[in-house]
Image (cartoon, rainbow, N blue to C red):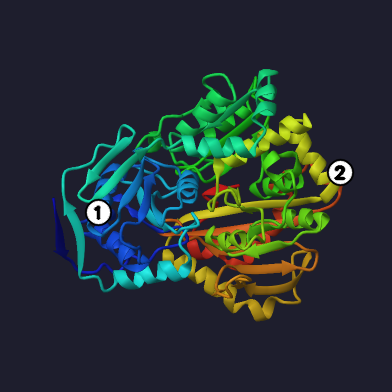
């Protein structure tokens, strides 16, 4: 086996976003495209000779082919060992778990998260650092800078490695260790949660349905929910990971997880429903005919954390992304602990967790997690909720409504406008920026504007500054509207509008969010001129 050094030229579009580099499969399959980016990673991270790397992905189309390329490039670049998930499978939280457990130098995760898969779908690659979390901006920027000047990449001339059974083989001087992708993660979950109490709950007739959406979480959910916790076989639906996710969109929300929603809102509904996404880092929680917003989910988990063994000593702090509702802030205030407001992107939570400042964190985009790993963790959140239900012996709806009665309800919704013309979306954001000076102090509908800004964040740990994180319009009554361009799509632009109003009156807690927020929705459309500028009359997704 010989190392080949291949001449190449840069691509101009390899700037990682909030969760790595995401493009269409057809882009990644261009000659040299994947190789250029992987070599740029290796050139930027300065791994010592003989270092250990973790490698795996969500099983989407092109996953296996990309893994073979990366293995041969890792061997050519001096790595001593790669831990790769069996079949190329490794959920994002499980990858973080493995990096941390075995103290590897880092890991490469292949996923486009909740984006569609298949030959015409999306693919993604990101580098996670030694703490198990996504590379910070200084690392991703270094990778991008390198990608613009790269002139060659190194790859081992060798046959493909067999990935379908655990074991160890060699690729040149490098060991390739194929690992069970589930076992380490399952053991971590068993150390955090009261599995005995959850088993008793399920044995007593409590019924659940978990939708793996033909994505990576299927094998994990089968092992933990059905095998270790004893839920009846079939409690996990769409459990087989497929390269195209069965033709679905692996995004766990009320729109794309429609099969699960029909079951949970239908006749003879189970007591509990949940779903996870393409790479296993997101979650949706449902009770019988009842949807729990991600913002409320974080707040309820924080308020009930001491009922969970892994968190029985209490929380040191909570963190949430800026667009996430302030429901968690109210819990933090009651507990006498800090609540940090960060930009969107899990890497911002990593610094806080490494510094011991927070125990739980979450994003409104169906992501929740804790210091057990350095990624969002969908199945972890499901187990957390099952532990709460087992401890309180109440339904999901009862738990949430009692929470609202104590803390008030932060009525919340997100409207996504996907695939917009990029120029039109940018025009909306420019209009909002240009309106800052004229809006403060005026009334929009029945609400008086208190402030307008573009959110910026100074990291309290390393002092780094992140600017341009989303336009906020805050009102005197505590309501707010947030506009943000998403960095996770691959086609056109996605504009997200976040709407929030605080409601302390228990008699109004039953109101549907879209009805309760109707005036804010109208204000958002008027002030942004969204319909006029984009031609869109309705959002693509409402959550």
Q: Is residue 401 visible?
A: yes
Q: Which residue is mark 2?
A: 507
What residue is rendered at 16% in x and 47% in y? 158
Q: Give the label on residue 367, or none.
A: none
Q: How many residues crowd mark 1 within 10 Å: few (<14), some (14–19), many (20+)? A: many
- Near-viewer residue (540 or 7): 7
Rendered view: 52 above or below 10: above
Name the image quarter holding residue 152: bottom left
Instruction: Identify which residue is drawn at 60% across, 48% down.
Output: 368
The one nearer the camera, 244 or 353, is 353
Looking at this view, name the residue that lies furthest to the bottom.
Answer: 437
Q: In the rendered image, which residue does mark 1 sit on?
A: 75
Q: Nearer the viewer, mark 1 or mark 2?
A: 1
Dot 1: element: helix
Q: Secondary structure at mark 2?
A: helix
Give the image location of residue 139, x and y in percent.
Answer: 42, 68
The correct choice, above or below, for 20 with respect to 287 in the image is below
The first of marks 1 and 2 along the sequence is 1
The crowd level at tag 2 (other Cα within 10 Å; few <14, some 14-19, many 20+) is few
Give x and y (percent) for residue 18: 47, 61
- In space, the residues marked 1 and 2 are separated at their CA atoms by 64 Å
Measured as percent of width and height from the top left, residue 107 is found at 40, 53
Determine the residue positioned at 54% across, 30% down.
Answer: 224
Query: Where 353 sits versus 469, above or below?
Result: above
Front-lying residue, 255 or 344: 344
Residue 199 image offset from top left, x and y in percent: 65, 24
Q: Is residue 379 above or below residue 315?
A: above
Count of marks overlaid on the render: 2
Residues marked 1 and 2 touching at CB (< 8 Å): no
Q: Residue at x 36, y 48 (%)?
A: 55
Residue 253: in sight, yes or no? Answer: no
């Amino acid at each position: 086996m010989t190392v080949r050094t291949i001449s190449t030229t840069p691509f101009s579009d390899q700037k990682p976003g909030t969760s790595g580099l995401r493009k269409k499969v057809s882009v990644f399959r261009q000659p040299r495209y994947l190789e250029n980016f992987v070599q740029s990673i290796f050139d930027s991270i300065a791994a010592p000779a003989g270092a250990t790397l973790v490698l795996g992905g969500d099983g989407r189309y092109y996953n296996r082919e990309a893994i073979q390329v990366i293995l041969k490039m890792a061997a050519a670049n001096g790595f001593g060992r790669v831990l790769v998930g069996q079949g190329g499978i490794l959920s994002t939280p499980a990858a973080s778990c493995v990096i941390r457990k075995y103290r590897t130098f880092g890991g490469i995760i292949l996923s486009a998260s909740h984006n569609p898969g298949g030959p015409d779908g999306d693919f993604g690659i990101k580098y996670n650092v030694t703490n198990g979390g996504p590379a910070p901006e200084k690392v991703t920027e270094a990778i991008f800078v390198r990608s613009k000047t790269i002139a060659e990449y190194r790859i081992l001339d060798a046959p493909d490695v067999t990935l379908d059974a655990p074991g160890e083989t060699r690729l040149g001087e490098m060991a390739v260790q194929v690992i069970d992708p589930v076992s380490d993660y399952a053991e971590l979950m068993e150390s955090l949660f009261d599995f005995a109490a959850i088993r008793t709950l399920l044995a007593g007739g409590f019924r659940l349905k978990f939708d793996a959406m033909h994505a990576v979480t299927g094998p994990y959910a089968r092992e933990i929910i059905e095998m270790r916790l004893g839920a009846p076989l079939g409690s996990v639906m769409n459990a087989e990971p497929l390269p195209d996710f069965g033709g679905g969109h692996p995004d766990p929300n009320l729109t794309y997880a429609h099969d699960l929603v029909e079951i949970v809102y239908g006749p003879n509904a189970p007591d509990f429903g949940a779903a996870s996404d393409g790479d296993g880092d997101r979650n949706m929680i449902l009770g019988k005919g009842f949807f729990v917003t991600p913002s409320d989910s974080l707040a309820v988990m924080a308020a009930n954390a001491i009922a969970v063994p892994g968190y029985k000593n209490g929380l040191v702090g909570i963190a949430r992304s800026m667009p996430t509702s302030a429901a968690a802030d109210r819990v933090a205030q009651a507990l006498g602990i800090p609540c940090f407001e960060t930009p969107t992107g899990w890497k911002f939570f990593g610094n806080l967790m490494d510094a011991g400042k927070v125990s739980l964190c979450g994003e409104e985009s169906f992501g929740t997690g804790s210091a057990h790993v350095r990624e969002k963790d969908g199945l972890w959140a499901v187990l957390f909720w099952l532990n709460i239900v087992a401890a309180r012996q109440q339904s999901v709806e009862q738990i949430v409504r009692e929470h609202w009665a104590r803390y008030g309800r932060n009525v919340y919704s997100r409207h996504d406008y996907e695939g917009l013309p990029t120029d039109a979306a940018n025009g909306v954001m420019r209009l909002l920026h240009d309106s800052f000076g004229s809006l403060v102090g005026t009334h929009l509908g029945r609400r008086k504007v208190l402030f307008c800004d573009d959110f910026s964040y100074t990291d309290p740990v390393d002092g780094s500054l992140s600017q341009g994180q989303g336009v906020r319009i805050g009102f005197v009554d505590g309501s707010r509207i947030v506009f943000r361009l998403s960095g996770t799509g691959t086609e056109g632009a996605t504009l997200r509008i976040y709407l929030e109003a605080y409601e302390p009156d228990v008699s109004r807690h039953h109101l549907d969010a879209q009805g309760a927020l109707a005036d804010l929705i109208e204000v958002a459309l008027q002030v942004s001129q969204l319909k006029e500028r984009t031609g869109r009359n309705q959002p693509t997704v409402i959550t």
